[in-house]
Structure formats: structure tokens, C-alpha cells
Image (cartoon, rainbow, N blue to C red):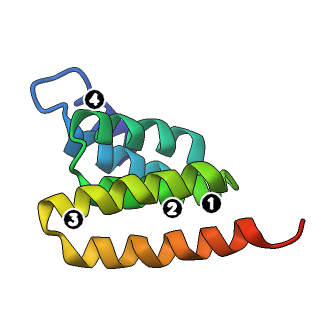
Amino acid sequence: MISQLEKLLGTPRDGALLRYSLGLEHAKAGNHERAIEYLRDAVTRDPLYSAAWKALGKSLSDSSLHAEALEAHRQGIAAAKQKGDRQAEKEMTVFARRLEKLGKQPG
């Protein structure tokens, strides 16, 4: 699946959706570094892509990059609010709160 999607990079079908799809596939494969790269590309190409923000936050969190994950969720919440995507907004709010609590625990 990844190789099929990667063949579309640089073609007219390349865009936020393709980058998002590649990010999800790499995350499923456990390759969070590549997932993060593609998901960052997706939100750069479409800053209001709330699903991509949510996936980016999850991949960053799975990579123990909690501060970056929290920031991705915050940006995703703002994007979701702007788009009226209430479900994504609610989910990312829950994830952000968990990360905030994690950051406040004594280390």
C-alpha cells in the first residue's frame, strides 16, 4: 500500500489527502518518523485538515514527543473549530488534556 501511494508523490494527485494517507500507513507500520513527516506535509498543504492534525498529534505522542503532540492537538482544535468539525475538536481536546496532565506529573 505504501509503495502504491508513494508512486503518486509529485503527480497531479499529490496533495494533503495523499500525504495524510501516507502518514496513516506509515503510522500503522510503526514507522512514526515517516508518519510525522507526511502528516506535517498534509497540514502544511491544508492547515484546516483536522483529521491530519489529529493523526499528527497521535504519531508525535506515540514517539514520546509529548510537547509537540500537545501543540499539534491545539492547532488541530483551532482548525476543527474553524471548519465546524465538532467531533475532531472533542477528540483532540481529550487528547490534549491527557498530555497536559502528563506534563504536570512529577518526573
Image location of residue 10, percent across then percent down:
22, 20
Amino acid type for the residue under numbered disc 4: Lys
Mark 2–mark 1 contact, CB under 8 Å? yes
**What residue is shown with label 2?**
58
Image location of residue 44, percent across then percent down:
30, 34
* Distance Cα–Cα, label 2 vs label 3: 19 Å
State which mark lies toward you, 4 or 2: 2
First in sequence, mark 2 or 3: give its number. Answer: 2
* Distance Cα–Cα, label 2 vs label 1: 6 Å
Determine which of the numbered discs, if any, sits on residue 81 in the image: 3
- Residue pictured at 23% horizontal, 34% vertical: 45
First in sequence, mark 4 or 2: give its number. Answer: 4
Give neighbour class at mark 2: few <14, some 14-19, many 20+ (Cα, 10 Å). Answer: many
**What residue is shown with label 1?**
62
Helix, strand, or loop for circle 1?
helix
* Distance Cα–Cα, label 3 vs label 1: 25 Å
Image location of residue 27, percent across then percent down:
50, 54
Amino acid type for the residue under numbered disc 3: Lys
- Residue pictured at 40% horizontal, 70% vertical: 92
First in sequence, mark 3 or 1: give its number. Answer: 1
Helix, strand, or loop for circle 4?
loop
Determine which of the numbered discs, if any, sits on residue 7 in the image: 4
Q: Is residue 16 left or right of residue 73?
A: left
* Distance Cα–Cα, label 3 vs label 4: 34 Å
Give neighbour class at mark 1: few <14, some 14-19, many 20+ (Cα, 10 Å). Answer: some
State which mark lies toward you, 2 or 3: 3
Observer-nearest residue: 30 or 69? 69
Amino acid type for the residue under numbered disc 1: Asp
- Residue pictured at 50% horizontal, 43% vertical: 36
Image quarter hosting the C terminus: bottom right
